Amino acid sequence: RKEVEQDPGPFNVPEGATVAFNCTYSNSASQSFFWYRQDCRKEPKLLMSVYSSGNEDGRFTAQLNRASQYISLLIRDSKLSDSATYLCVVTSNTGKLIFGQGTTLQVKP
Amino acid sequence: EPEVTQTPSHQVTQMGQEVILRCVPISNHLYFYWYRQILGQKVEFLVSFYNNEISEKSEIFDDQFSVERPDGSNFTLKIRSTKLEDSAMYFCASNDGPGGYTFGSGTRLTVV
């Protein structure tokens, strides 16, 4: 089983749509969880941390279910500028980041 | 906003040559990392560095790789004898422990 698993997509959505990404992770001892955004040939940039209570940042909502080892990201009212690859990331027991393959989002006018 | 700086942005080298990738982490950060991303694949951990020594390394980080912090600011990754399969984006990152990681903009290494 992959350490962090994501649907690679691509997800093609019209502007204004709501889109949800899912992720599962294998290590139940993981302590920290993140969504990163990566634009083509650029470095990963932190989008948001993910907490068990769920957290929201503007149009973005992240959820964590530790029992199911499942993480989600919801993007509301998609913008053209949201087009990117979204990386689900967890920390190992030792603190290093473990990345998923990424889910590609293309928002079209 | 503080940033992690990497040089060069693009390096082309012949197979078998040595390359050194350079990074300047954020000055008050204590933990330093190298990750790599082969085109079309996921970001992979290579090595972590703390208190002037390697704290963890992956299976990818074999004897051909080494890291060094030669002074108070630079953090380097050396590949002794490059192979075609070393072609990738190499990202340096740093963090201060409890805080989030900051990644550099990467070095694209092309081995020909």
Image: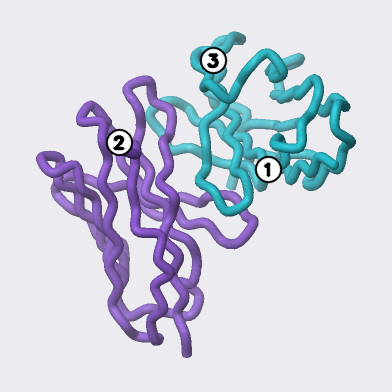
Label 2 packing within 10 angstroms: few (<14), some (14-19), many (20+)? some
Outermost residue toward the left in this view? A67
Q: Nearer the viewer, residue A90 or B59?
A: B59
Q: Is residue B47 left or right of residue A86?
A: right
Q: Mark 3 highlights which residue?
A: B50
The answer to which of marks 3 and 1 sits earlier in the sequence is 3
Using the rendered image of the protein, determine whether residue B30 is visible from the camera's viewpoint. Answer: no
Q: Nearer the viewer, residue A107 or B68?
A: A107
Residue B88 position by quadrant: top right
Q: Amino acid at mark 1?
A: Ala
Tell me the subunit letter for badge 2: A
Q: Nearer the viewer, residue B108 or A81?
A: B108
What secondary structure is marked by label 1?
strand
User: Chain B, which colour?
Assistant: cyan
User: Chain A, which colour?
Assistant: purple
From mark 2 to mark 1, how far is it between C-alphas? 27 Å
Q: Mark 1 highlights which residue?
A: B88
Q: Is residue A10 shown above or below B27?
A: below
Residue A32 is marked as: 2
* Number of numbered labels in the structure image: 3
Q: Is residue A72 shown above or below B52?
A: below
Q: Is residue A26 left or right of residue A45?
A: left
From mark 3 to mark 1, how far is it between C-alphas? 24 Å
Quadrant (top left/top right/bottom left/bottom right) for the C terminus of chain B: top right
From mark 3 to mark 2, how far is it between C-alphas? 20 Å
Residue A63 position by quadrant: bottom left
